[in-house]
Image: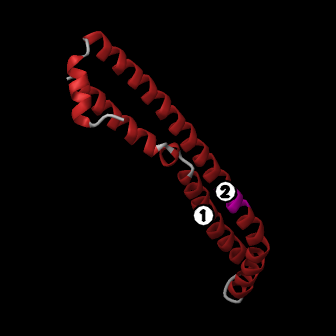
Amino acid sequence: MTTLHEGRAGAESRSIGELLRDLANDSTRLVRDELTLAKTEAQEKVSQVGAAVAMMAIGAVLAIPALVLILQAVVTVLSNFMWDWVAMLLVGVVIALVGYLLVRKGQNDLSAGKLAPERTAANLRRDVRLVQEKVS
């Protein structure tokens, strides 16, 4: 492996054609490496999505019977102060609102922006700067 000083001396004695060929080879290798990184990062994100969806499903299944019992208790307590149908309607509306907010939160967590390959994007920006510096 050559040192930085030896690499510069070698670069000064090489033709422009050789330097451009090296730049093209380096750029090709760089793009190939970045594509490999993007593929790996995308696979990681898919795994994260799968785990998140599985956890949400398991949590929902376990929460249903507990929620039914708790809501029935709330309706029973409220029925002491108002008509039964008003107590049920009030509890139903509140629970529907909470459910809606939870669904929106889950959708937001699965949005494209949160699943973007951040490391790949950062590396691509860095690589573009390095290539621009080499060309300049």
- Sort mark 1 into few (<14), some (14-19) or many (20+) by Cα contacts within 10 Å: few
Q: Is 88 above or below relative to 77? A: above
* Predominant SS of the magenta segment: helix
| Residue 73 position in % (x across, y down) | 74, 84
Residue underneath mark 1: 97
Q: Nearer the viewer, residue 103 or 79?
A: 103
| Residue 25 position in % (x across, y down) | 41, 21
Q: Is residue 56 magenta?
A: yes
Q: Which residues are magenta?
A: 52-57
Q: Residue at x 25, y 36 (%)?
A: 4
Which three-letter amino acid code belongs to the residue tagged 1?
A: Leu
Observer able to see residue 88: yes
Q: Is residue 6 left or right of residue 51?
A: left
Q: Is 122 above or below relative to 18? A: below
Q: Nearer the viewer, residue 43 or 127?
A: 127
Which three-letter amino acid code belongs to the residue tagged 2?
A: Ala
Task: Report, in whole angstroms, how far the alpha carbon at label 1 lies from the one at label 2.
Answer: 26 Å
Q: Earlier in the sequence, mark 1 or mark 2?
A: 2
Q: Is residue 71 left or right of residue 108?
A: right
Helix, strand or loop at mark 2: helix
Screen quadrant of the N terminus:
top left
Q: Are marks 1 and 2 in contact (CB under 8 Å)?
A: no
Residue underneath mark 2: 51
Q: Is 105 above or below relative to 77? A: above
